[in-house]
Amino acid sequence: MNSNFEKILIKNNKILAVKDLQTLEKALLSSSKIIFLLSSDICSIEETTRLIKASGKLCFIHLDMIQGLNTKDNSAIDYLKDNTFADGVITTKSQVAKYAHKIGFLVIMRCFLIDSLSLTTTEKLFNETYIDAIEILPGVMPKIIEQISKQSSIPIIAGGLISDHEDVNLALKSGAVAISTTKLNIIN
């Protein structure tokens, strides 16, 4: 885990997640200092990440959602490292996360908590050194966020279904260090 990144998350605890390139322009003008790029394609990813970095923001690419990118092969991650301006990656795949960390990306593991088995699987990640943060989805589960944040030394980001300031406050009060949302009105 990167303690400098944790400090950045705590200071900039509202992360804007961009689902489509039409909202990118608004995201670049937002007060959010961190952008999660949830959608792009291999042809535009370099330019998109350049724009994000030029706006003074940290850029995280959701590897599992980039069209034309096959993360089963480490060369795709090497390509992103060499040809984009991304600071880090988001993934649901441990092997991808390990390799991305090895080549110098910050790594956020995205975990969908849908039942007790997925919670147990997530808890197994708490001691992994290749993870800089864990994003828990959906982010509107204060009891689970509190339980996880007490067990993990890795920073927790609450994401998914965060729809208003009450959700933000509840997630942060429950132990998340930051939230991610596609709702621009929550960020500004």
Image (spheres, rainbow, N blue to C red):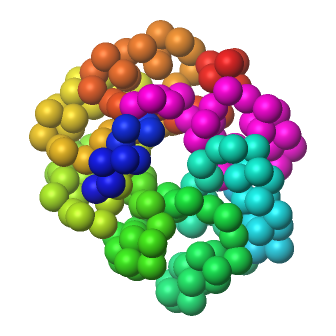
Front-most of residues 147 and 120:
147
Front-most of residues 127 and 9:
9
Residue numbers of the magenta segment: 10-37
Q: Quadrant of residue 28?
A: top right
Note whether 54 is above or below 187 in the view shown: below
Question: Which quadrant does the N terminus fall into?
Answer: bottom left
Q: Quadrant of residue 140?
A: top left
On whether residue 17 falls in the magenta region, the answer is yes
Note whether 79 is above or below 89 in the view shown: below
Query: From this viewpoint, which residue is outermost toward the top?
Result: 166
Front-most of residues 89 and 50:
50
Tell me residue 51's x, y (percent): 80, 53
Query: From this viewpoint, which residue is outermost toward the left?
Result: 151
- Looking at the image, can residue 143 be seen? yes
Which residue is drawn at the image coordinates 40% and 47% (left, top)?
Answer: 5
Tell me residue 95's x, y (percent): 36, 77
Tell me residue 79's x, y (percent): 64, 83
Note whether 162 is above or below 16 in the view shown: above
Tell me residue 73's x, y (percent): 52, 88
